[in-house]
Amino acid sequence: MNKKAIIILADGFEEIEAVTTADVLRRADIDVIMAGLKGYTVTGAHGMVIRADAVFHENDPLPDALIFPGGLPGAENLAGSAQLKNVIIKMNSEKRLIAAICAAPALLLAPAGVLNGREATCYPGMEKSFGRDIKAVNAKVVQSDNIITSQGPATSFIFALKIVETLAGKDKARKVSRETLFGA
C-alpha cells in the first residue's frame, strides 16, 4: 500500500519547495495531495498559481506525512490557521511524519510546540523564533524522530529525498536520486 502525503499550500508559498517536493515524492510512488489551505487556487510567493488537488479540512483522515513549504507570507498564512495547528499536534502525538522547510519550521512548527526538545533547522536567521527549548542546527536537513526540517529552496531536493527515505526506504530514495541525476 502506498504511503499518503499531503502538502499544504497557503498563498505566498515558496514554489520551488512545494513543486520539487511533490515531484520527488510522486517519482517514489508516494500518493501526494497538494491541498490548498483556503481553496483550490493558491498563488505562490513569486506569482506562480497552482490549482490544488484538494482543499484542507481539519477532519480529513490523517495522512502518513504532512508537509509544509515555507515562503513569505506563505508560512505566516499557514501559522494563522488554528485548525492546521490542531492537526499538527495530532500528527505529532501519533508520531506521523511532519516535514517543514524554510520559514515553516520557525513560524508554524515551533509555535505549535512540536519542536520542543528537538533539533531543527530553518531558513538562516529565522531560528531566533525557535525559543530555548529547540536546538537550532545549521544543516541542510535535520530529522528528529518524526519531524524533518530543512533550510530553503536550494535544499528542497535533499529535503524531499529525506521524506522519501523515511516513508519508502533508503533504496527508493537512492533510486529516485539516481534517476533524476541528483546523485550522479
Image: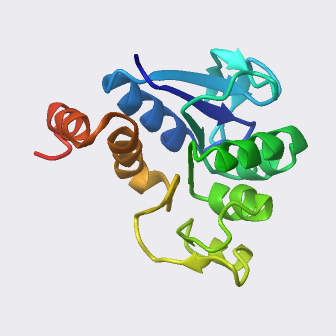
Give the x, y percent position of residue 85. 81, 47
Image position of 169 (left or right of 91): left
Name the one closer to the observer, 91 or 46: 91
Image position of 57 (left or right of 148): right
Give the x, y percent position of residue 89. 75, 49
Name the one closer to the observer, 184 or 57: 57
Q: Quadrant of residue 140?
A: bottom left
Which residue occupies 56% across, 66% down? 123
Compared with 139, 58 (above or below) is above
Image position of 35 (left or right of 78): left
The number of numbered badges drawn on the structure is 0
Name the one closer to the observer, 182 or 58: 58
Quarter of the picture containing the C terminus is top left
Q: How is the image coloured?
A: rainbow
Give the x, y percent position of residue 45. 66, 43
Image position of 117 (left or right of 149): right
Compared with 130, 96 (above or below) is above
Which residue occupies 72% across, 45% down? 88
Residue sitting at the far bottom = 132
Give the x, y percent position of residue 149. 52, 58
Which residue occupies 77% across, 45% down? 78
Q: Quadrant of residue 169?
A: top left
Residue sitting at the far front = 94
Which residue occupies 40% across, 16% down? 1
